[in-house]
Amino acid sequence: MKRRLKWAVVGGASCAAVAIVVSMLMTPEVQPASSPLQVPQAQDSELALPRPTTSVSALPPLEQATSPDSTTSQPPPPPATTSEPPNRQPPPRRETVTLPQGVDFQAEDALIQNGVVKSSPGGFTGRGFVDTDNVAGSFVQWTVNASRTGQTDVSFRFANGNSGDRPMDITVNGILVDTLDFPSTGSFSAYRVLTIRVSLLGGGNKIRATSRTGDGGPNLDKITTS
């Protein structure tokens, strides 16, 4: 009886030992708490990395936003001016018509309206002179040819034996250029000259002297271009 009890005790102790061993084998090993990771401090020379350089470009200022209900717009900027002086052209020069000096155009050879050719009294040149009728609108018209467009002097040779003036309108190609009063010369055989400057076109030009009053014009002998 004692022997059986002894083996039972021994057997129970062995089973307990086996159970402890098995339990130890089945339980995972618990790692001890790890100590905090120690990171070595870098030296200043190790952290001195080159800093990237950045370039900032100057951007143009943003345009000011206009209100959507604004009715006026800003005027455009004035155009840029240059310091170079403008290319100025000289003013056109007035040229004198190339006509033979002292060319006479006789009144008796011109177109006559309300007038007659006479040869008395004397003092005239050529074959005679034109005595205009005592009506307004009587005229003598000469045709003058010019080599090119320009200006020339025109002289009217006349005689007026009356006491008052005999005014006449002077037109060139239908355009009024002057009014001459043709004053008294003292007698119808005494001649004087009145000169005006007119513009002529290249080619033929019509120069007309038209009486302004019912007394008519003076006696007209000729015109001379110079």
Image (cartoon, rainbow, N blue to C red):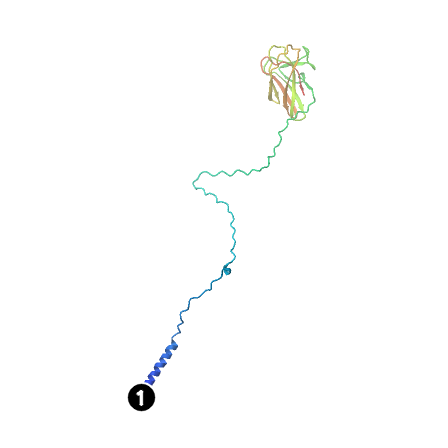
Q: In this view, does 92 lie above or below 36?
A: above
Tell me the quarter of the image containing the N terminus: bottom left
At x 65%, y 20%, the residue is: 154
Provide residue 144's location: percent of width, then percent of height: 66, 22
In front here: 101 or 217? 101
Q: Nearer the viewer, residue 207 or 25?
A: 25
> In the rendered view, would you say 129 is above or below 205?
above
Residue found at the very far left of the displayed protein: 1
* Residue 80 placement: quadrant: top right
* Number of numbered tags placed on the structure image: 1
Q: Residue 160: image x %, image y %?
A: 63, 12
The picture quadrant where one finds residue 173 is top right
> Which quadrant: the C terminus?
top right
Considering depth in this image, is 131 or 162 the residue closer to the camera?
A: 162
Front-most of 212 and 68? 68
Left-right relation of 8 to 61:
left
Residue displayed at 32% across by 87% down: 6
Q: Position of residue 72 (x, y in %)?
A: 45, 38
Report the side of 37 relative to 149 (left or right): left
Secondary structure type for disc 1: helix
Badge 1: few (under 14), some or many (20 or more) residues near its Cα, within 10 Å?
Answer: few
| Residue that numbered label 1 is attached to | 4
The image shows residue 90, relative to residue 58, as above or below, that is above
Which residue: 30% across, 89% down?
A: 2
Q: Is residue 52 left or right of residue 178?
A: left
The amino acid at mark 1 is Arg
